[in-house]
Image (tube, helix red, strand yellow):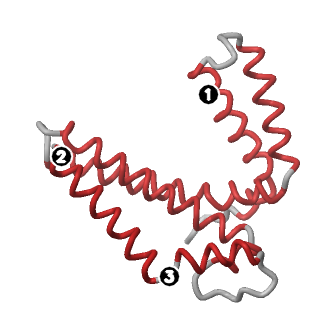
Amino acid sequence: MALEFAWLSEGLPIFGFVLVFVLIYAILTKTKILGETASINTIISLILSIIFLSFSSVRNYVINITPWFTVLLTISFFFMLIIVFLIKDNWTKFTKPLSLVFITLFSLILISAFFYTFPNTQAYLPGADESGANSFLLSIKHFILEKETLNGILLIIVTIVVGLIITK
């Protein structure tokens, strides 16, 4: 029997507020951008969290991203655990490629959640209905999706990968 946690959805704005507050406070404390004064970091974190709470579209974006980020972290944890058990001595060789894979997957989650959260942006996806969309952005979309442009992007990516392999 599955546990019922639907009642938690009532507190999602509060959870989002707390998540943003803690993340901003941790970043300000770690980077020491505003100094080492905890009260200033707390006030700035509180102000930014209140601003975050007041915009429902941004809050919905974070609410849509958070479960997928949790799934990505869980999968990454188990993947790294398997690698640690299999390769005990050369763990440092795998940390940089794993971080690149993690950043790439997280970027894809952010982009897909952006298009899921904001329905007005779906017109800019390939094959979507383009009625009511900005003509300038549509021209950019059509330029990027041209065969020649995609071939050029692929050529640049292959060149970068080959260059990285050769220089190592």
Against 70, is 17 above or below?
above
Residue drawn at x 13%, y 45% as measured from the top left: 87
Q: Is mark 1 on a helix, strand or loop?
A: helix
Quadrant of residue 112 within the rendered picture:
bottom right
**Mark 1 vs mark 2, CA separation in Å:** 32 Å
Against 115, is 94 above or below?
above
Residue drawn at x 53%, y 55% as measured from the top left: 69
Lower position in the chain sequence, tag 2 or tag 3? 2
**Mark 2 vs mark 3, CA separation in Å:** 46 Å
Quadrant of residue 135 within the rendered picture:
bottom right
Q: Give the residue type that dot 3 points to.
A: Glu
Residue drawn at x 67%, y 32% as measured from the top left: 24
What residue did someone put label 1 on? Answer: 26
Side of 43 relative to 139 (left or right): right
What residue did someone put label 2 on? Answer: 85
- Residue 58 pos. (x, y %): 77, 55
Lower position in the chain sequence, tag 1 or tag 2? 1
